[in-house]
């Protein structure tokens, strides 16, 4: 007898009491892709330190004034190592990078010889959306693979716009046993890519009549989007491919930028092909499990049946994804893609537009998901969303309002040194640089970032009392929106 439990990604046989048990569980982050336990295998991403090559300016400036009389109270008080003693017994210059602005040192100094202030250079980083704090957090996650925790608490605004106007319902947080990170209880972060049918049909003898579509399971709802063009883009793409392969998810690569050194990772790559260039990439289509067709800025497409048929003629088993910008027709377009045989609908918003209006991506996901539900065809297509993903919480927030999978783009490039570049290419002054000897370093930072974000997804699922991320999709009743709460309490002020 064979029992198969498809929980995360690929499965491998374990013999338990005479049964062949195929199990993959999720959990902590260390070692290789799957760590063997006594009776199960635990999915995790290999994490190790990967210091940045482009250092950020310190967040705070600690000043030590001339009235210091070397009492060294600050050295005793600081738990972060900002203050230390030199070999000659005097207090050394403060280490600004280590400061958390807890003010314990300044309070402990009897002479008031210490002050702590914001660093103007740090405040100038990034944009109004990819803020300095978000960039600093991304750097920490990419360097350590850990979940960031601030001992000084959160001093920012209570609510913002877009994803920042949403809060999860953590009513189940009182149940500490539901803890996916530490493995005390199983929580799945696996999702399926592809079409699902609403029911299975059998004949009188029990023979399956339904044509079951092909789906691909990935162990977390995150894929990596194609990077912007850069001087060292070839090495960046190799690092992207290696990270996708090591974590068993997918990375999107522009087909025209595909090279021989990516062939070893083809099973984890999604070539993005321009609609008018399909014939040039028949071999690439044949070697890929998923192919994405991009129509660029062309939004009014009557049908994609012809494109699906041409791809299936080359590779019948490949999944077909179509990429369009979010707009007022996204719901109807997703419906049409479903009817025309597409497996995946990839909708996006350029990050520069999200910066101008953070509500745009949140509203677009909600609308597209709700439209498909109203048409009774939500499970007929996978909805991939990209744009505006600037921190770990944006992944479950995208999912709870309707997305199946999130495609991360600018955030991982920031982890490699990008200064927040928009458009099709990194700016000439952007310090992102993956040299010939930096591929392993870049790969590790990408893996660390994904591991940290997945751990934070597990924390959210555990707090909500959900055993799998599939259950979270579209669970809008379990999320609170700031505007709705204010309208309920204070009334409609418009």
Image (tube, grey):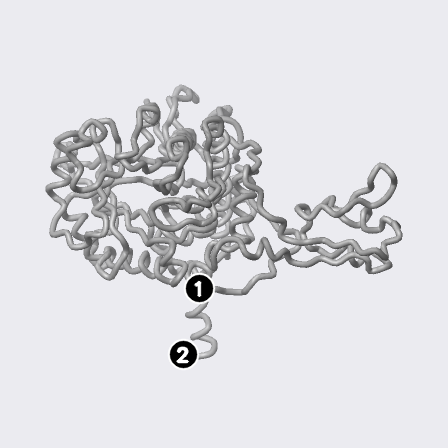
Rendered residue at 23%/29% (across/down): 284
* Residue 492 badge: 2
Q: Quadrant of the N terminus?
A: top left
- Picture coordinates of residue 62 (x, y %)? 72, 53
How many numbered tags mark residues here? 2
What is the crowding at mark 1: few (fewer than 14 residues within 10 Å), some, or many (at least 20)?
Answer: some
Where residue 101 appears, as percent x and y from the top left, is 69, 55
Q: Earlier in the sequence, mark 2 or mark 1?
A: 1
Image side of residue 188 versus residue 366, left or right? right
Q: Is residue 160 left or right of residue 308?
A: right
Which of these two is toward me, 234 or 368? 234
133 to the left or right of 79: left
Q: Disc 1 designates what residue? A: 161
Residue shown at 41%/46% (left/top)?
427
**Residue beneath the point at 15% across and 38% down:** 210
- Residue 487: x and y in percent read 43, 75
Labels 2, 1: front one: 1
């Amino acid at each position: 007898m064979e029992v198969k439990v498809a929980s995360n990604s690929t499965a491998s046989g374990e013999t338990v009491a005479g049964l062949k048990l195929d199990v993959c569980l999720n959990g902590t982050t260390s070692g290789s892709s799957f760590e063997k336990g006594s009776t199960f295998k635990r999915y995790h991403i290999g994490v190790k330190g990967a210091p940045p090559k482009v250092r950020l300016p310190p967040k705070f400036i600690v000043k030590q004034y001339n009235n210091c009389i070397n009492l060294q109270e600050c050295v005793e008080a600081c738990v972060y190592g900002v203050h230390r003693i030199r070999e000659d017994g005097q207090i050394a210059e403060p280490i600004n990078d280590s400061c958390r602005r807890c003010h314990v040192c300044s309070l402990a100094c009897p002479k008031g010889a210490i002050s702590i202030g914001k660093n103007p250079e740090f405040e100038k980083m990034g944009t109004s959306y990819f803020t300095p704090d978000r960039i600093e957090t991304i750097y920490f996650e990419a360097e350590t693979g850990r979940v960031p925790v601030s001992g000084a608490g959160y001093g920012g605004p209570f609510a913002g716009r877009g994803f920042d106007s949403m809060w999860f319902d953590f009513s189940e947080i009182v149940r500490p046993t539901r803890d996916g990170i530490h493995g005390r209880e199983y929580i799945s972060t696996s999702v399926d890519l592809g079409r699902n049918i609403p029911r299975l049909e059998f004949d009188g003898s029990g023979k399956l009549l339904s044509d079951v579509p092909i789906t691909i399971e990935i162990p977390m709802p995150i894929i990596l989007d194609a990077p912007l063009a850069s001087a060292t883009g070839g090495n960046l793409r190799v690092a992207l491919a290696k990270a996708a392969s090591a974590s068993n998810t997918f990375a999107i690569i522009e087909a025209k930028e595909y090279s021989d050194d990516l062939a070893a990772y083809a099973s984890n790559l999604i070539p993005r092909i321009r609609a008018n260039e399909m014939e040039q990439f028949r071999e690439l289509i044949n070697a890929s499990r998923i192919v994405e067709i991009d129509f660029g800025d062309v939004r009014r497409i009557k049908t994609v049946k012809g494109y699906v048929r041409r791809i299936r003629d080359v590779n019948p088993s490949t999944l077909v994804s179509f990429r369009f910008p979010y707009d007022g027709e996204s719901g109807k377009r997703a419906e049409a893609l479903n009817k025309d045989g597409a497996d995946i609908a990839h909708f996006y918003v350029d990050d520069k537009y999200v910066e101008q209006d953070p509500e745009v991506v949140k509203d677009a996901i909600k609308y597209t998901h709700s439209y498909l539900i109203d048409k009774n065809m939500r499970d007929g297509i996978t909805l991939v969303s990209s744009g505006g993903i600037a921190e770990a919480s944006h992944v479950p927030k995208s999912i709870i309002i309707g997305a199946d999978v999130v495609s991360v783009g600018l955030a991982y490039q920031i982890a490699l040194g990008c200064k927040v570049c928009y458009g099709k290419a990194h700016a000439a002054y952007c310090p992102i640089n993956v040299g010939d000897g930096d591929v392993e370093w870049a790969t590790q930072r990408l893996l660390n970032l994904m591991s940290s974000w997945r751990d934070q997804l597990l924390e959210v699922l555990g707090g909500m009392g959900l055993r799998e991320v599939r259950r979270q999709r579209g669970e809008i009743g379990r999320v609170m929106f700031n505007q709705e709460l204010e309208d309920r309490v204070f009334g409609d002020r418009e």
